[in-house]
Image (spheres, grey):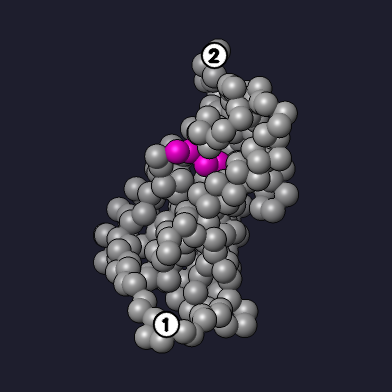
Amino acid sequence: YEIMTQTDGIYGGRFSGAGFKGCCMALIDPEYADSISATVEEKYLENLNRRIRDVARLLNCNYTARDYLVTLTYSKAGYVKLRANKPPKVSASAHVYKAAEKEILKLIDRCRYRCSKLGVTFKCIYITSNIKFRTKNYARIHHHVVVNCEAMEILKNLWPHGRVLTENVYNEADHTGLARYMMEQVPYEKGHNNYGRTLNLETPIITDHVLLDPNKVLTPPEGATVLKTNRN
């Protein structure tokens, strides 16, 4: 919506629909239709790729193939609990999303407490999603948590609401693929990092690379993922 309001050729618009599966509608000048479509898509991808880059840096700096991606799901009973006590003027999906955020934060606090008692390091980053990867279709609310191997079993055993799926983080030097998998499932909200709480993660040190030969054209190595960027 924010992108739409800053694009030439749009007279006005609004966000419509319930919860996080709504849409944007706009009244436009027909002569600008093609440029509006191209501009909105380009800026959306810029925002997405910037978020993917930021999360990939965190993952690269803090996790190895020994660590885990943990998916936390909600059983039918767990989902019913999330839907309870919905205010009358709040959509069901928005209420469930907010309730799920409270549950994952409770879990992280409990896991942090248990780990501190046992003298175990606990590092995590998580997202909450109700969107399927790639298709963007609606999915039952769930969480993805990247956690260090020492704390994985503790986190897993503390989740009370449904199934827990675990898999090792891929043995890769660059975790951009995992970052993309996570961030493409998160609804975008301007002014927010769009991933949940991080705990005990080292901050990446960003350095700029210097091209020693100005006549040399840089090309990505085979298998690399190229992200769009507005940086020179």
Magenta-drawn stretch contains 225: no
Q: Residues within 10 Å of mark 1 (few under 14, many from 20)?
A: few
Quarter holding the N terminus is top right
- Determine the image quadrant of residue 22: top right
Magenta-drawn stretch contains 187: yes
Q: Which residue is mark 1?
A: 214
The picture places residue 142, in percent across and down from the top left corner, at 58, 46
Marked residue nearer the N-terminal end (1 or 2): 2
* Horizontal relation, residue 62 to residue 27: left or right: left
Work out whether residue 161 can be spotted: no
Question: What span is colored magenta in the figure?
Answer: 186-190
* Horizontal relation, residue 79 to residue 175: left or right: right
Quarter holding the C terminus is bottom left
Residue sitting nearer the eye, 27 or 164:
27
The picture places residue 184, in percent across and down from the top left corner, at 59, 52
Mark 2 residue element:
loop
Q: Which residue is mark 2?
A: 89
Q: CA distance from mark 1 to mark 2?
A: 60 Å
Principal SS element in the magenta part? loop
